[in-house]
Amino acid sequence: MIKHLVQHAIAITPADLAMLESVLEEILTRRGIAKGTDAASRIAVDLLDLFQHGIRNKQQLLAMLSGTKNFP
């Protein structure tokens, strides 16, 4: 899912892409959102936006997008 959005984003390494996919999978699981839904796409866009704006820490991304409002 992330891979399709990345085409229009900044250069992302294979390691970054793997981390972003991992974060997205975890967020969708935590929030009970199915892949391929509009909600999942919105989260993927938000994830890429955060990444492009310098948030590169996996735990911080997870916390910021998990919906719990508890992040460092």
Image (tube, rainbow, N blue to C red):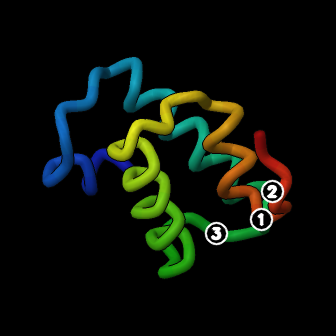
Residue 47 in percent (x, y) is at 48, 53
Task: Give the distance between the C-alpha atoms of the residues marked 3 and 1, in whole angstroms.
Answer: 16 Å
Residue 4 in percent (x, y) is at 26, 54
In the picture of the structure, the residue carrying the numbered disc 1 is 67
Mark 2: which amino acid? Answer: Arg
Q: Secondary structure at mark 1?
A: loop
Q: Quadrant of the N terminus?
A: bottom left
In the picture of the structure, the residue carrying the numbered disc 2 is 30
Q: Secondary structure at mark 3?
A: loop
Q: Quadrant of the C terminus?
A: top right
Neighbour tally class for label 2: few under 14, some 14-19, many 20 plus, Cα within 10 Å = some
Quarter holding residue 33 = bottom right
For the view shown, which residue lies furthest in the front direction?
Answer: 72
Regarding residue 22, the answer to whether it shows in the image is yes
In the picture of the structure, the residue carrying the numbered disc 3 is 34
Tell me, yes or no, whether the two marked residues, 3 and 1, touch with CB atoms within 8 Å.
no
